[in-house]
């Protein structure tokens, strides 16, 4: 079998006396979409932050393409250049235009010439339906447009892995679909994605695998069809019944 693009082994994360992740093992193959589901506080966001080294891993390893990201000798900033991240709250710089938000990292971090960075950014904006917004500042955009701009920013550095952290949770319901359509398109284009989501219907449509987290442990892992329609673990069944009942 081919080596997975992302390999996590024995991952532990604590905040003081509170253990948030407990011996997590997870593989993500190249071009695969893996969705993390679970209740608030289950460890989904912390797992993504550990992969991107935004949180220090207390124990265990994270490998990306054969390189151990958790090796203390590795420059974390160099490792992060290979990963794109989109957060819940957009995190666009309010004083910069959309175009400047997207080109900042390629120019400053990766040393891409401005003209080349802007050409790439304009192509992404056109693809994401924002071609006419490049000169606008974030406060002129709707929530869905801001999140699409944040996705464009994450893609501008051509990452090997894209991490998405509940990217629809701050959106009005009518804007959720336009952002999820972008993610579905990225899947079709072969992007490798690890995402935390509370959109069960979307996870069923696009995920190759779904992992249910509870108390920092992956309780159940399988195909989207199996986990979401025929869960085997009692905790998964309880969680899905609560989520689906609320809808």
Image: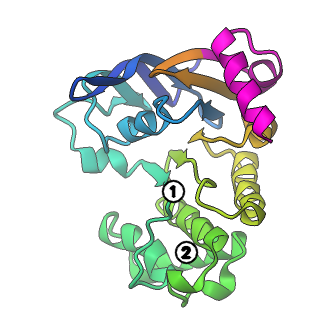
Q: Quadrant of residue 10?
A: top left
At label 1, counting other C-alpha atoms closer than 10 Å, the crowd grade (few under 14, some 14-19, many 20 or more) is: some
Q: Which mark is residue 158?
A: 1
Query: Which image quarter is the C terminus in?
Result: top right
Indicate the position of residue 74 as horizontal and vertical percent values: 21, 37
C-alpha distance separating marks 2 and 1:
11 Å
Does 225 appear in magenta? yes
Q: Quadrant of residue 173?
A: bottom right
- Image position of 158 with respect to 162: above or below: below
Side (left or right) of 133 relative to 243: left
> Which residue is rendered at x = 66% and y = 41% of the image?
198
Query: Which image quarter is the N terminus in?
Result: top right
SS assignment at label 1? loop
Which region of the structure is painted magenta?
220-247
Asked whether 128 or 11 is in front, the reply is 11
Side (left or right) of 226 relative to 27: right
Does 131 appear in magenta? no
Which residue sits furthest bottom? Answer: 135
The residue wearing badge 2 is 121
Residue 185 visible in the displayed image = yes
Side (left or right) of 194 relative to 127: left
Q: Of helix, strand and loop, which mostly describes the magenta segment?
A: helix
Indicate the position of residue 203 as horizontal and vertical percent values: 73, 37
Residue 208 visible in the displayed image = no
At label 2, counting other C-alpha atoms closer than 10 Å, the crowd grade (few under 14, some 14-19, many 20 or more) is: many
SS assignment at label 2? helix
Side (left or right) of 107 relative to 156: left
Indicate the position of residue 201 as horizontal and vertical percent values: 80, 40
Q: Earlier in the sequence, mark 2 or mark 1?
A: 2
């Amino acid at each position: 079998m081919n080596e997975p693009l992302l390999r996590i082994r024995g991952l532990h994360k604590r905040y003081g006396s509170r253990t948030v992740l407990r011996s997590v093992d997870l593989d993500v193959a190249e071009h695969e979409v893996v969705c993390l589901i679970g209740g608030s506080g289950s460890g989904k966001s912390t797992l993504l932050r550990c992969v991107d080294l935004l949180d220090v891993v207390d124990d265990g390893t994270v490998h990306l393409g054969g390189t151990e990201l958790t090796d203390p000798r590795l420059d974390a900033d160099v490792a992060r250049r290979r990963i794109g991240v989109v957060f819940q709250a957009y995190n666009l710089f309010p004083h910069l235009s959309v175009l400047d938000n997207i080109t900042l990292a390629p120019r400053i971090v990766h040393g891409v010439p401005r003209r080349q960075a802007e050409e790439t950014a304009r192509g992404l904006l056109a693809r994401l339906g924002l071609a006419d917004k490049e000169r606008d500042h974030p406060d002129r955009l709707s929530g869905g447009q801001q999140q699409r701009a944040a996705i464009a920013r994450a893609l501008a550095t051509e990452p090997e892995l894209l991490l998405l952290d509940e990217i629809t949770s701050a959106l009005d319901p009518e804007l959720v679909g336009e952002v999820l359509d972008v993610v579905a398109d990225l899947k079709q284009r072969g992007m490798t994605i690890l995402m935390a989501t509370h959109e069960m219907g979307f996870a069923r449509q696009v995920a190759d695998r779904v992992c249910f987290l509870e108390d920092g442990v992956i309780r159940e892992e399988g195909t989207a069809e199996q986990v979401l329609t025929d869960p085997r673990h009692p905790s998964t069944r309880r969680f899905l019944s609560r989520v689906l009942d609320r809808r």
